[in-house]
Image (tube, rainbow, N blue to C red):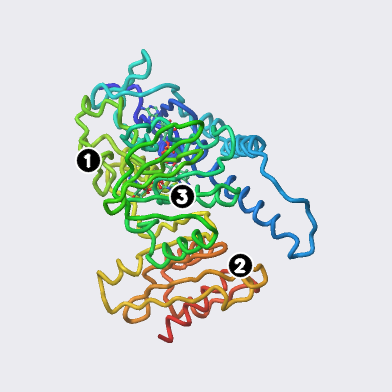
Amino acid sequence: MEYTFDVLVIGGGPAGMAAATRAAELGARTAVVERSALGGTCVNSGCVPSRVLAKTARLFREVRTAYDYGIVVDEPAVDWDRTVQRVRATVARVLASKGYGATMERLAIELIEGDAELTGDHRVLVGDRELTAASIILCVGGSGRRLPIDGAEHAVLPHEVLDLERLPGAVAIIGGGHTGAQLTTIFDALGSQVLLLDLAPRILMTEDEDVAAAVTAGFTGKGVEVETGIGGIDRIERVDGHLTLSWEHDGDRRSRDVDAVIMAAGWPANLPGLGLESAGVRTAGSFIPVDDYLRSSVPHIFVAGDANGLSMLVQAAVVEGETAAENAVLGATHTSPHHLLPEGGFTDPDYAGVGLTEAKARERDAECHAVTVPYAVVERPIIDDREQGFLKLVVDRRRELILGAHAVGENAVEVITAVAAAMAGGTDLSTLARVKFAYPTYSAVIGHAARAALSG
Ligand SMILES: Cc1cc2nc3c(=O)[nH]c(=O)nc-3n(C[C@H](O)[C@H](O)[C@H](O)COP(=O)(O)OP(=O)(O)OC[C@H]3O[C@@H](n4cnc5c(N)ncnc54)[C@H](O)[C@@H]3O)c2cc1C
Ligand SMILES: NC(=O)c1ccc[n+]([C@@H]2O[C@H](COP(=O)([O-])OP(=O)(O)OC[C@H]3O[C@@H](n4cnc5c(N)ncnc54)[C@H](O)[C@@H]3O)[C@@H](O)[C@H]2O)c1
């Protein structure tokens, strides 16, 4: 059969753009269907806006401590409208820097604007245009989850935060995953009273336990209320211009009056309306499961990025997009390992990790080693007045292999990315211990941790 395209990519976020670029580079006739804006969640409503808000929060904190350095400023205040304008302008600049249009033109990738629906295993309907493709790569991403409770419509989802008319005096954030933790820091730093609620026994369940504990302590030390292990959220009511949020904890009914409620309680894939049943693609919960080659239950329909639920990070989305494209065009032989993906959050303090947490490493081998070195063993955090923090290295029982690294504190994400580069290069512990780090840097803590791990 003659298809309209060799490869049809649905979704133009990080996964979709990586998939389309790679497929076209390999000579495939390729198109991308996008119903909203190229760049996806990451650029338009996720990482980039969050990062600008994190920078805003950081600036506000620093201006307030400027006098410690002999700088005299008036009492700072937040102009929320201007903050929002700045975020939107930065999103536009990042989009422009991506050069999607030029890449698509150079590689003859067709952009089809609209909502894609599968009508068969090789057929996709976009508006009134029916397309066919030899292979389809689903890169549809996910969306914030609105809890099925009374009054849920009063809550704001993460992508709607910029639509808040004003900075809330008091805000409740439901969900202490990466998104909820970042929003906690942002609103706390900008002056809101923050209540963070989670069903789970701790926040940041995917991070190393010590990391989550340190971030929690950082939050509570600033006056954020963190309540984990709750039984469930009951309802949200609008009463006299404010919202009353009610929840259950160990049989107690609790409630709080706030100005805004943000739901950051999960990130299901964008499956509604996608027509997966018409194509025979199986789902599991709110994701589309894939095999090692990123194939769905229909072998010529691949899934990359958040939609497969493997690892909801940009760095994963990009590598999966490229892998899915290679498998679609060249035959399914490529896998995309996830164990060396550094990740982290821009909270206060920052946190990050790569590889196995200490708990996961001990499940595999109880005799592995973990050492934790405080940030203050090096001078830079002291110079910057950011001594709080640590780097934990998890190494095998022979003290050769680095199994994982976890950090809390200033520049934690950059520190961990440096360890990830060492791990990716196959660097053993004794080699890492001999690396010379520039002075005065945060990453110098890596050398200290490696030497501490070697010596026991
Ligand atoms: C607040 C927030 C902050 C984040 N911060 C970070 C961070 O700092 N670092 C990090 O690594 N990750 C971060 N993430 C996660 C990151 O945004 C995602 O992992 C990444 O965007 C996934 O890329 P994707 O291409 O799979 O999906 P998306 O970026 O969601 O793109 C999917 C695209 O598909 C389109 N689409 C969906 N269905 C259809 C359809 N039927 N037809 C046509 N088009 C469709 C959508 O419009 C969208 O453009 C953050 C997420 C959030 C919510
Ligand atoms: N910096 C980053 O890299 C970054 C930032 C944001 C998001 N992300 C990615 O996006 C994905 C989504 O992140 P997320 O934080 O939005 O979702 P998540 O699924 O990671 O976390 C949701 C949190 O909400 C809690 N929760 C669920 N139902 C609840 C309820 N009824 N009441 C109270 N708490 C409830 C869960 O226990 C969990 O802690 C993640 O996989 C993450 O990797 C990454």
Q: CA distance from mark 1 to mark 2?
A: 44 Å
Residue 88: name its quadrant: top right
Q: CA distance from mark 1 to mark 3?
A: 32 Å
Vertical placement of residue 4 versus 25, above or below: above
Please state which amino acid type lies under the numbered disc 3.
Leu
Does dot 3 land on a helix, a strand or a loop? strand
Please state which amino acid type lies under the numbered disc 2.
Arg
Does dot 2 land on a helix, a strand or a loop? loop
- Where does the image place residue 192, in percent across and percent down from the top left? 56, 47
- Where does the image place residue 364, in percent across and percent down from the top left? 25, 70
User: Which mark is first along the chain, 3 or 2?
Assistant: 3
Please state which amino acid type lies under the numbered disc 1.
Ala
Find residue 284 and name its label: 1
Taking the image as four quarters, which one is ligand 1 found in? top left
Residue beneath disc 3? 195
Question: Residue drawn at (53%, 52%), measured in percent from left and top?
Answer: 185
Q: Locate the N terminus by quadrant.
A: top left
- Where does the image place residue 422, in percent across and percent down from the top left? 46, 68
- Where does the image place residue 238, in percent across and percent down from the top left? 44, 31
Question: Residue drawn at (37%, 19%), measured in percent from left and top?
Answer: 126
Residue beneath disc 2? 386
User: Which mark is first along the chain, 3 or 1?
Assistant: 3
